[in-house]
Every structure is written in C-alpha cells, then in structure tokens.
Amino acid sequence: MKDMIISPAVEFYDVVTRTHSEGGDALRSVLAEVDPSAGPILDVGAGTGRTVQIIAEAVPGARIVAVEPDLVMRTVLTHRVVADDDLRSRVTILADDAQGMAIPETLSAVVLYGVVGMLDRDERARLWDRLLPRLAPGAPVVVELLPIEQPQTLPPMPYAKERIGEHLYEATLRGEPGEDDLMVLNTTWRITGEEGEVRTVHGTSQWHTFGLDDLARETGLTAERLTLQAGLLRASG
Ligand SMILES: C[S@@+](CC[C@H](N)C(=O)[O-])C[C@H]1O[C@@H](n2cnc3c(N)ncnc32)[C@H](O)[C@@H]1O
C-alpha cells in the first residue's frame, strides 16, 4: 500500500458530503436496478461510509465490500457499520487500497466515488485489468469525479457551509496545476462562533485530472453522465 498523506481537513469530510448530495442521489437511482444475487457490491475508497449507507439502502440484501486504506476514514466507517445491525451483517471492510485489494470473484456493481483521481494512469490501467473481468453481465460501475478535466487555476470559491451547535463551519476551495496531470486542491476551513474565529484549518489534496470519456476509453465501457460529477460506465449490449 502506498504511503497516504493525511490532510488535517479530514475531520470535516462529512460536512462536505452533506453540502454536496447530488452524486448520492444519482448513485441511489442507478443501484435500484441492481440484482444483488449476482455477487457483492464493491465500494472502493469507501471513506466514512456515506456511499456504503446509500448502497445498503438502495439494494436491500446486497453484500457490500468496502475498501478504505486511510486509518482515520476507516475508523469512522467502522464506527458507522458497527453501530447499525443491518450494515454490520452485510458490510465487509478491507484495509487496503485499490492497487492491493482482493476482488470478489463476481461483482453485481462497483462504486468508485471520489477515488479514481487518486490513481495515476498506470494505476488505473491495472485496476481496470483486475476489475473488469469480475463484473457480472450488465453490472454498473458508478463513478464520481471532480469536474476538472485538465490542471488549471481555480480561484477561491465557497465549498461547504454547515452550522454545528454554536459554531459555523465554512470552507473555501482553491486549486492550482500540479505536476503532469495533477491538480493541487487547497481547502481552508474557518470555524466561527458568537465571539468570532474559533479556529482555522488548511487541507491539501491532489487529483489526477481526466474526464468521463477518458474513463470510457480506458475501460472500453459505455459512459453515461448522471450529474456534473457522477457518471455510469457499463458494458454495452
Ligand atoms: C473523497 S473520499 C470518498 C469517500 C466515499 N467514497 C464518498 O464518496 O463519500 C476518497 C476516499 O478514497 C480513499 N483513497 C485514497 N487513495 C486510495 C486508493 N489508492 N485506493 C483506495 N482508496 C483510496 C481515501 O482515503 C478517501 O477515503
């Protein structure tokens, strides 16, 4: 497993996913058609379990394999799974990355939300080589990507806003081109209360840029855009 850079902004991950929920709705509607008897649903880069929860609700009875290499994210994931009788009976958690994970023999669906851009071209090629032969006929591969197809400068923009108790959490996102196909994304979280600023936290992450059509070319699957960020890849016919 590659060394992972832990961003200090990791604690705010679930604040972001509350603000940006369109991709979750798209995932729910694609998965509603899945036949779970074909095999488990694989959730790669399962994070804190947002997508695991959606899969479990959308496909009652499906077994779920949740792959999450980061200790902090996986701790929250395990907390969420163990606290719920239904999730605890259906979700298997693997502490691996996409490059090293064991893949079940046959998969009824694959969820790749917010994770494909963590992989460079060679890592993606190896992932497709291992994953595609395991897809049951017609199994969807549902992806959520950043809507950034080439490295570019992103001026600071509001990213998330949530009130928790007496504090307001507000994030600003800005980006700049990194090496080769990389974007460097910087978030600044300002937490304020009645008395003013409580604390400020800076986070950085990197994302290999490409588009949904690039993934269709890489995989040989047919792509359908679901939202600005979410897309569906599936074998045609
Ligand atoms: C943006 S989060 C998405 C979490 C979840 N899928 C969701 O949509 O809420 C990306 C996740 O991918 C994980 N990740 C990073 N590199 C990875 C890799 N090489 N293989 C698998 N997961 C990885 C991170 O630890 C993080 O939890």
Image (cartoon, helix red, strand yellow):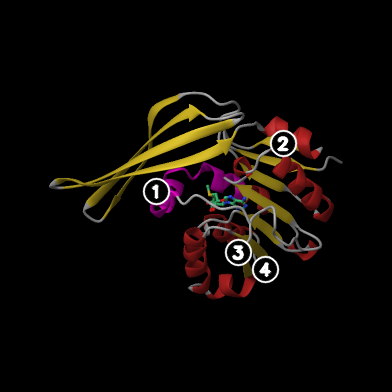
Ranked by sequence position, the earlier of labels 4 and 1 is 1
Q: Where is residue 182 in the image (x, y as percent from the top left)?
A: 57, 32
Crowd band around label 4 with a 10 angstrom C-alpha radius: few (<14), some (14–19), many (20+): some
Does residue 63 appear in the picture of this structure?
yes
Q: Which residue is drawn at 72% across and 54% down?
A: 109
Report the quarter where the C terminus lies. top right
What whole-number distance in Å separates the C-alpha atoms at marks 3 and 1? 21 Å
Crowd band around label 3 with a 10 angstrom C-alpha radius: few (<14), some (14–19), many (20+): some
The amino acid pointed to by label 3 is Ala
**Circle number at residue 61:** 4
Q: Which of marks 2 and 4 is in front?
A: 2
Ranked by sequence position, the earlier of labels 4 and 3 is 4
The amino acid pointed to by label 4 is Gly
**Circle number at residue 182:** none
Does residue 33 appear in the picture of this structure?
no
* SS state under label 4: loop
* SS state under label 1: helix
**Circle number at residue 9:** 1
| Residue beneath disc 2 | 215
Ranked by sequence position, the earlier of labels 3 and 1 is 1
The residues colored magenta run: 7-27
Q: Which of marks 2 and 1 is in front?
A: 1
The amino acid pointed to by label 2 is Leu
Q: Which of 51 and 69 is in front in this view?
A: 69
Q: Is residue 201 above or below residue 175?
A: below
